[in-house]
Image (cartoon, helix red, strand yellow):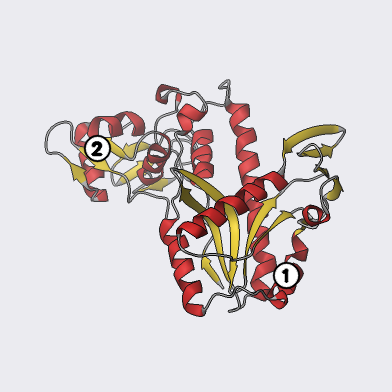
Amino acid sequence: MIRKQRETPIHLLQIEALHRRLAPHHSKKNAIEEELYKYQAGLKGEQSLDYFLDPFNSDQYSVLHDIRLPLNGQHFQMDSIIIAPTFILILEVKNLSGTLHFDLEYNQLLRSIQGKEEVFPDPILQVARQEQFLAEWLKQQAFHDIPIYSLILVANPNSKIEVSGGTREQRLKILHLAKVPYVLSELLQKGSPSKLSDKQCETLIRQLMSQHTSYTPNILSYFKLHPNELLTGIHCAHCNALPMRKVYGGWLCAYCNYHSRTPFVDALTDYRLLINESITNKELRRFLGVPTRNIANKILRQLTLKRNGMTKGTSYSLERIGLK
């Protein structure tokens, strides 16, 4: 059964917000669009894993998606892991089209498509590190000798897989997504000298979930951008135009006449994703394009945000805004 659902990565939400908030002809718009496509394709590939696992949903194992764990002052991340009494299986999904050549001798992944070739980091090394880190993390939690396996799953069924070099064990890790249920069935039948009790499995799952830490990068620093480069105002949810203007009883889009009472929630979500998780009245007026302090105060009261301070520089927490 699925114990931790898959979530849209914060980094993807940030890139989507950044794409909305940059002018069409901004010098970094194309780079951000490429990053957006890459992360959307990655999420789509991971979601396709659920399609193959759902029909085989069983109480023989538990599935946890998007796990990021602390280890010796740093963190490591896994797309999905399967916990069974006799093993742990790490699943790394790659959603790439074209011909995929896994060069295990030189530790690289080569993708050929439409006459072009791209080089990617070696997924075999990636899952080997994940196995090593997870084994160390388990040892620190007093779980010993649990067999850990890993698979590299190609999500696109039309992609051609080629493998050269490496050991037979390494080559068998690389397969199309559709084969996962059969490999999982083989592992369940295989057994192991080390077996976790139901209570130990439950304890392990709780520890994995309690120690999971999401990652929120500074997206503007990542792309070397300044907040002043962002478009301000409230987007129209109907036609995406900027900005909506304040009218009696709500906000109106001048382009399509769409009317809304609370369109500022999405704009404040963008602010939270891109700039800061708290906001002052002055910052709200600037980012949303609100004409007066009084209107800004009405928005803040309407949202019942947690406040910090009682003076002119009072800030309001945006932790309850969006990202549900």
Q: Is residue 238 visible?
A: no
Q: Is residue 213 above or below residue 112?
A: below
Which residue appears at 70% of the width and 70% of the height? 184
Residue type pointed to by label 1: Pro
Which residue appears at 49% of the width and 38% of the height? 17
Q: Earlier in the sequence, mark 1 or mark 2?
A: 1
**x then y, percent, for residue 256:** 49, 41
Q: Mark 1 and mark 2: span between their CA atoms?
A: 54 Å
Nearer to us: label 1 or label 2: 1
Which residue appears at 65% of the width and 34% of the height? 34
Residue type pointed to by label 2: Ala
**x then y, percent, for residue 94:** 70, 49
**x then y, percent, for residue 117:** 82, 33
Going by the image, does 256 lie left or right of 82? Answer: left
Going by the image, does 268 lie left or right of 311? Answer: right
Q: In which quadrant of the rendered image does the N terminus lie?
A: bottom right
Disc ID at residue 255: none
How many numbered marks, from 0 up?
2
Residue in the foreground of this view, choosing between 62 and 6: 62
Q: Which residue is mark 1?
A: 181
**x then y, percent, for residue 90:** 63, 58
SS of the residue at dot 2?
A: helix
Q: Which residue is mark 2?
A: 296
Going by the image, does 163 lie left or right of 293? Answer: right
Q: Is residue 146 above or below residue 302?
A: below
